[in-house]
Structure formats: C-alpha cells, structure tokens
Amino acid sequence: MKYLLLIASFFFFSVEGHSQAFYTETGTAIFHSEVPMHTFSGKSEYLTGKIDLNTKIVDFYLDLTTLETGISKRDRDMRETLETEKFPFAEFYGEMITPFDPDTSVAQEITVQGTFKIHGVEKDTTYTGTLEMQPDGLMLTANWVLRLEDYNIVPPSLLFFKVDQEQKIEIKALLKPMEDH
C-alpha cells in the first residue's frame, strides 16, 4: 500500500508540478532616437524577465546603465537624462490578456496589460507582441513607442536640437523553461 501511494504521489506531482514558466537574463532591448538629420540607437543584452503561462504573469526589467549607444559621452548624457543613479531600472509587471497556445510552434500575437515604470513614474499600459514556442524555449518579440514626457523625462539636446519625445523600443528574448521546484 505504501508503494502504491508513493507511485500515485509521484505521478500526481510530476503531472501537476510541471511548470510552464520561462525566464531570461539575456534578452535584448533597443531604443531608437532621433534629432533632426540624425538618428541613433542604444542597446542592452541584459533584459531580464519571466513569463508564466499558467498564471499569465509577465515580469521584465532592464538595468538602464547597461544601455550603450556606441559613444561614451552620449551614454553618460543618456544616464544623466534618465537619472540612473536615482532610477536605475525600467520595469514592466502585468499579465497576458490574450490566449496563448503552447502546443503550437506558430508565432502568436499576444497582448499584455500592466504597469510600466521608468524614471520613477508608473503608468498602466497595454503592449502587443508575439510569442513563439521553440524547441529551446519561448521567443518573445515586441515593439512600441515610449513618450519621454509621459515619464517626466526631459529630452536632452544635441547642438540646438532636442531629442525627439518619441523613442521607438524593441525587445527580443528567448526565455528558457524554468526548473520545477
């Protein structure tokens, strides 16, 4: 009888305990910025996040000091503008509000709703992106426009021109399955 209970509990926990949570510390975040007659981008390979398909929770953050534009003075100016010593992270916490079928390998459009926080300002937001189940994990891609004034960020100037209020944001990450605990 003891062995029967042990086998039954093993079967129950192996089926019920299977997690559909995915995690990354190596996602890519890119912003594209413009001033008249000049564009530039910043990039980080340290986007960290988790997506749990069971609970629908989506949780991502980026250490803004890891963003690099390729020019150290511009990087310093960007960090000063974002006040990264005071507000080092951009964060999103929310949930998937559209269904996702993990049993298909076709890229699926999903919508998430939650709170985005940068520069000490939190805003309720809704973003659309794609999730695609791949053999080695879950691929996430998303693009949106961030308005600096919405987060009390004063755009810096380049010569006599101010950086555009609208920053185009891209993220891409392969999230690996988390180990069951």
Image (tube, helix red, strand yellow):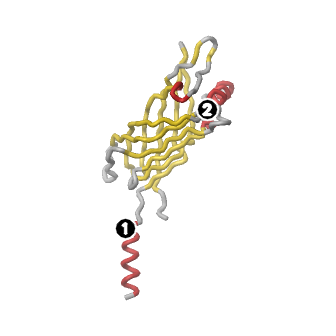
| Relative horizontal placement of residue 120, taking residue 173 as reference (left or right) | right
Query: For the residue marked with disc 1, what is the amino acid?
Result: Val
> Residue pushed farthest top?
160
Secondary structure under badge 1?
A: helix
**Residue 26 % position (x, y):** 54, 45
Residue at image position (40%, 54%) is 55
Give the label, 2 or 1, closer to the camera.
1
> Residue pushed farthest bottom?
1
**Residue 61 % position (x, y):** 54, 43
| Quadrant of the frame with the N terminus | bottom left
Identify residue for label 2: 68
Query: For the residue marked with disc 2, what is the amino acid?
Result: Glu
| Relative horizontal placement of residue 120, taking residue 51 as reference (left or right) | right
Secondary structure under badge 2?
A: loop
Pointer 2 local density, CA inside 10 Å: few below 14, some 14–19, many at least 20: many
Mark nearer the N terminus (2 vs 1): 1
Pointer 1 local density, CA inside 10 Å: few below 14, some 14–19, many at least 20: few
Instruction: Check the image and report above or below for 120 versus 20.
Output: above
Q: Nearer the viewer, residue 85 or 13?
A: 85
Instruction: Check the image and report above or below for 147 versus 95.
Output: above
Residue at image position (40%, 36%) is 126
Identify residue for label 1: 15
**Residue 161 % position (x, y):** 59, 13
